[in-house]
Image (cartoon, grey):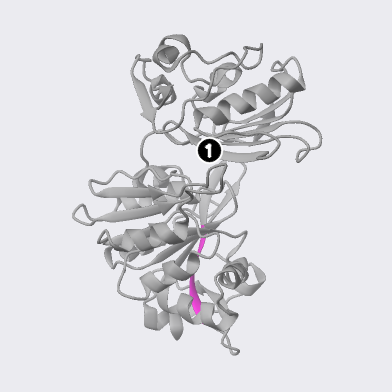
């Protein structure tokens, strides 16, 4: 077991640190020589007494409230996002590239994995949802790269998002977006949340699932566990990468099949990114209502092409992915980020165009699209979504 000091959680919440520890199943890495940038990790029993997080020179940023991302581009090049965009940190540095490499190796080891020339790109989850990615040369020709995504601590509900203007128009005027989405949850509609990276898709999906009835069982499948859902019957499954011998990997496709054996009332895929789209659409088309997932897309107009690309990975042609998607997904929620603000940019429904291909039409705000309406959408109006002019 690798022991990671749980005071990280307390510090992120703004509470006083306490000496409890959080254990995660992972092989314990062998101790390595200390350096100025990557201090040696003590034996597991002593970690809690020595270091608050195990992040060494990054600790002050990890525990700083409001920090969402940390990026290291070189020994003297660190950037931090505090929610309002990236800012360079001029007073941070590592003595050398070799010290930075040691830091990357140790941070990856905290997540129970190993990084070297044979495996130069590694992604791990550490502790209570910290996501860390590292790349070593020569894949990164200018030196070691480290990216850290820090999860939001605590839970957000729709009321919290509403107070921040998430459901309002860009000019602050009120919309019917929230009522449409709440109706979709009550009616057990299947919802696809779209947006660019860092737009707030996971945060919104967490709030949506937290609003589900307490007597429903929610089973989520994630590549890296990031959803933070306040619900009495929420469980999640996390994919596992193969070990150094190429064995032991557990894919999202397999986890979707396992989840169906767990009698979910709501089936959730944290992020649609590959061939697992086939299993998800199949499940949503065979009686598993109330499901949800997220998809990277820069606009509503980009969503069909993204789904067609995923369908190709799953062996589905454009027409097949179109028919299954129209039948399975009732509502699209598109989110965007502008500076420090994240807001709901528009709602859409899927439909078939004249060639039987997938297209998105703007949702007639206030009217919930049913499966029949999505296939023959009288409640949707084609108002320039194809040109990216969504509401």
Q: Position of residue 220 (x, y in %)?
A: 37, 53
The rendered magenta stretch, by its main secondary structure, is classed as: strand
Which range is magenta?
345-351
Circle 1 sits in a helix, a strand or a loop, which is it?
strand
Q: Nearer the viewer, residue 143 or 156?
A: 143
Q: Nearer the viewer, residue 153 or 118?
A: 118
Relative to 202, say whether 116 is above or below. Answer: above
Q: Position of residue 264 (x, y in %)?
A: 27, 60
Q: Which residue is mark 1?
A: 124
Whether residue 381 is visible to the viewer of this picture, yes or no, is no
Dot 1 alpha-carbon crowd within 10 angstroms: few under 14, some 14 to 19, many 20 or more: many
- For the point 37% across and 19% down, which residue is it? 15
- For the point 36% across and 21% down, which residue is it? 21
Does the magenta-highlighted stretch encompass residue 348? yes
Relative to 67, say whether 191 is above or below. Answer: below
Does the magenta-highlighted stretch encompass residue 307? no
Which image quarter is the C terminus in? Answer: bottom right
Q: Position of residue 276 (x, y in %)?
A: 49, 64
């Amino acid at each position: 077991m690798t022991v990671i000091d749980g005071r990280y959680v307390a510090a992120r919440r703004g509470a006083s640190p306490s000496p409890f520890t959080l254990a995660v199943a992972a092989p314990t890495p062998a101790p390595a020589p200390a350096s100025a940038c990557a201090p040696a990790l003590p034996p597991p029993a002593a970690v809690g007494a020595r270091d608050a997080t195990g992040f060494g020179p990054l600790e002050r940023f990890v525990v700083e409230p409001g920090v969402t991302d940390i990026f290291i581009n070189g020994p003297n090049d660190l950037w931090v996002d505090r929610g309002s965009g990236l800012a360079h940190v001029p007073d941070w540095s590592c003595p050398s590239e070799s010290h930075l490499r040691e830091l990357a190796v140790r941070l990856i080891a905290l997540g129970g994995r190993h990084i070297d020339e044979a495996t130069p790109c590694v992604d791990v989850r550490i502790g209570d949802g910290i996501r860390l990615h590292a790349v070593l040369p020569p894949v990164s020709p200018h030196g070691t790269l480290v990216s850290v995504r820090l999860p939001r601590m605590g839970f957000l509900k729709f009321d919290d998002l509403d107070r921040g203007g998430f459901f309002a128009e860009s000019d602050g005027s009120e919309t019917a977006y929230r009522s449409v989405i709440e109706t979709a949850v009550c009616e057990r509609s299947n919802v696809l949340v779209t947006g660019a990276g860092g737009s707030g898709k996971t945060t919104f999906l967490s709030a949506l699932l937290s609003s589900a009835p307490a007597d429903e069982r929610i089973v989520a499948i994630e590549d890296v566990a990031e959803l933070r859902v306040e619900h009495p019957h929420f469980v999640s499954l996390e994919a596992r990468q193969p070990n150094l011998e190429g064995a032991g990997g557990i894919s999202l496709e397999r986890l979707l099949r396992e989840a169906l054996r767990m009698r979910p009332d709501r089936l959730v895929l944290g992020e649609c990114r590959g061939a697992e789209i086939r299993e998800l659409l199949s499940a949503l088309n065979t009686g598993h209502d109330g499901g949800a997932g997220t998809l990277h897309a820069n606009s509503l107009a980009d969503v069909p092409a993204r789904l067609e690309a995923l369908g190709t990975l799953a062996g589905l042609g454009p027409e097949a992915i179109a028919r299954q998607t129209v039948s399975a997904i009732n509502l699209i929620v598109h989110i965007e980020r502008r500076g420090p603000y994240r807001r709901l940019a528009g709602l859409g429904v899927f439909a078939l165009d004249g060639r039987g291909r997938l297209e998105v039409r703007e949702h007639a705000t206030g009217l919930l699209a049913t499966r029949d309406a999505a296939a023959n959408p009288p409640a949707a109006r084609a108002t320039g979504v194809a040109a990216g002019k969504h509401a």
